[in-house]
Image (spheres, helix red, strand yellow):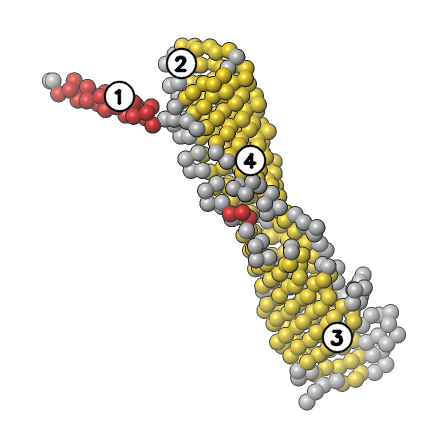
Amino acid sequence: MKILPILTGSVLLLLSFTILRAEQELRPYRLVNADRLFVDRLENEYLTRLNGNVHFFYGETEFFSDQAEIYEEQKLVRMIGNVQVLEDSLFLSANHVEYFRLDEEITLVGDVYIREEHQDGTIRTFQSVRGQYLRNEQQIYAWQDIFFYDERENVQGSCNYLDYNLESGYGLITNNPQIEVVGDQPLTITAEQIEFYRDFNRLAASFNVNTQYEENLVISDFLLYFTDDEYAVFLGEPSLTGEMADASAETFYLHFTERRISHATLENDCLVYFASREGGAKQSRINCELMELVFQEGEIREMQAYDNVKSHYVSDPDNRDHFVNYTESNKLIVKFNSDNQIESVDFYGQVRGQYKFSDKTIDNSEE
């Protein structure tokens, strides 16, 4: 009959010890300023109200607001009006903020702004309608009308959901995500989801990927973009649409120099339709297994086709000597001048083909 009280007392002692230990593990509170302070005794709760120029600390984290309510038993702090939170290199602000002390979780609502400062003095910022900061996990979440910017990499974007880890630098954006690599000729990426890695030195876009650069649009299922190495890989039946040419292949590679496109590589089942002059119809085509497109000032200046090359070239219809050429070869080079007109078409290796004029056909095959 005496065992029950002893066990009950032990349980109570254990609970008391656990609560005391939890209290000791919570970061200490220090009030710096408040114009007015009220303490209310509610049912099973002590409530401290702070009004006017509120300034306090929990551990090393600093809080500012117009008003604050501190619930002692719930370990909850609610802040209203011009709320600012400072912790090391992180700054957060919003209209309303709740700080859950037990979980070290900060939720933000209304005009959310988060700024992360890099060691070199540059910043990365996030703006949204709602946000959340999990302090222990170093994790940031944001929802609705999100805009973000990285000063060091000169990258900005928007979405409606963001998941970002401060420690690893990994981030995920979904719900109409868009990233723009800012520059004289910006590169814009949209997709169903986009992942970015530390310092935006690598981007991965998945599903319904659209990449716009100057007058060129690449559509693909997947994209890997390496900003430091200045090249992009497109997978999943990529296709390119440009002013002078449209292209498709199994894999695309775009290479950049100082963030301007310098050349593109197409691999496997390459098909290119191109025009003989700017504004002309894309009636000519090339099939091959490997193609290099050389760009200058954003315009295609040269097309180099290799391996099982088959071409169907239609000259300018306005040319007096208009003709159609069907050719197979090992290599083909098409060059464009600065006026976006074809300058030359050269075939190499086992050339077999025909020139068709309006009144005759000339066989141009090599045995």
The answer to whether residue 217 of the structure is visible from this angle is no
Residue at the spot of label 2: 46
Instruction: Name the residue at the bottom extreme.
Output: 367
Residue at the spot of label 4: 115
Tell me residue 51's x, y (percent): 52, 14
SS at circle 1:
helix
Label 4 close to label 1 by CB (< 8 Å): no
Q: Looking at the figure, which quarter contains the N terminus?
A: top left
Mark with earlier residue (2, 1): 1
Q: Looking at the figure, which quarter contains the C terminus?
A: bottom right
SS at circle 2:
strand
Instruction: Find the distance from the CA under tag 4 to the CA under tag 1.
Output: 40 Å
SS at circle 3:
strand
Instruction: Find the distance from the CA under tag 2 to the CA under tag 4.
Output: 34 Å
Mark with earlier residue (2, 4): 2
Residue at the spot of label 3: 345
Q: Please give the name of the residue rendered at 51% of the width and 48% of the height, measured from the top-left corner.
A: 197
The type of residue carrying mark 4 is Arg
* Mark 3 Cα shell of 10 Å, populated few (<14), some (14-19), many (≥20): few
- Residue 253, placed above or below residue 8: below
Label 2 close to label 4 by CB (< 8 Å): no
The type of residue carrying mark 3 is Val
